[in-house]
Image (cartoon, grey):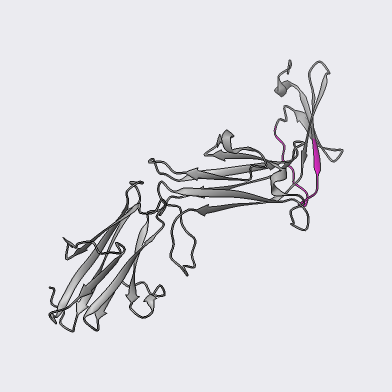
Amino acid sequence: YSTPLDEATISWIVGGKVINKAFGLTDFSTIAGKVGSKSTIIARVVTANGSAIDKTIIIQPADVDLLWQASSYVPPFYQGKALYPHQGVIIFTAVPSVSASKSIVSSANSYVYTWKKDGDTLGDYSGFGKNTFALQGTIISRPFTIEVSISSTDGVSLGAASVTINPRSPQIAFYENNPLLGVLYNKNISSFTMQGKELSVTAVPFFFNTQPAGNLQFAWTMNNSPIASQSDPSALTVRNTTDAKGSATVGVQISNVIKTLQFAGRSMSVTFGDNQTSI
């Protein structure tokens, strides 16, 4: 403007009514209507020389659900959410609801989406119909915030949402591999007492990226000494062929050979018989 705004009279008009009016009133807030309703807001600027300029925006409130899904591994029957690991892949999807009944009036790909990461617009992922995108983590891993704003093709603002993502370190769980029942995923074991001469245990990686196949490396130890790999690198079978009594510490390190920040370690105590003397 040729006249500074602080010297102009600014009127804010909502639904045809002047709600506020003052010199230099550049900021204004109002309560949006119900989901699906439209509100017309006019900022009328009258400059010192008497010229009037109107700027009109239309707001149509909408519920926006911002969903995310990490492409990380969790075992069968796991009831929690697969978490986003360091250097992982995460998929974001925006689901708008723009009617009073909270049903999607038209297809989600009928709107314009603007995606931002930590305040910076992601131009390659923003645009008409782009309600979802996948993000690949980098070697510099830290929390980040994803924002999405949605508008109609005629410029009506529909809503926005944001979510903050905290990368997590992968984890390992031990499960007994029963010769008759298979892997018993219902019980995560931290110690085990052998009732017979043999124990088979499976180390299950949580929140690792497991693609491409074969990218996870397993290194087993007993009492901190390496154990030769078996046919299934995620499993270990311990046999007490000499009827020894005592205990031992079984451990495993899992690492992603492609993504260096994805690694984890865990150990557990295995008791042979009733004697608690370490072997």
Q: Which residues are magenta?
A: 27-41
The quadrant the N terminus occupies is: top right
Question: Left or right of 218: which side holds 95?
Answer: right
Above/below status of 55 relative to 183: above
Question: Left or right of 245: which side holds 216?
Answer: right
Judged from this view, the residue extending furthest toward the front is 231
Question: Left or right of 127: which side holds 270?
Answer: left
- Residue 243 versus residue 224: which sits nearer the camera? 243
Residue 102: where, in percent of width, then height? 74, 57
User: Magenta: predominant secondary structure element?
Assistant: loop
Q: What residue appears at the point 18 percent right and 84 percent down from the top-left corner?
A: 274
Q: What residue appears at the point 18 percent right and 71 percent down from the top-left corner?
A: 248
Above/below status of 218 relative to 279: above
Q: Is residue 17 magenta?
A: no
Q: Is residue 34 magenta?
A: yes
Residue 18: where, in percent of width, then height? 84, 36
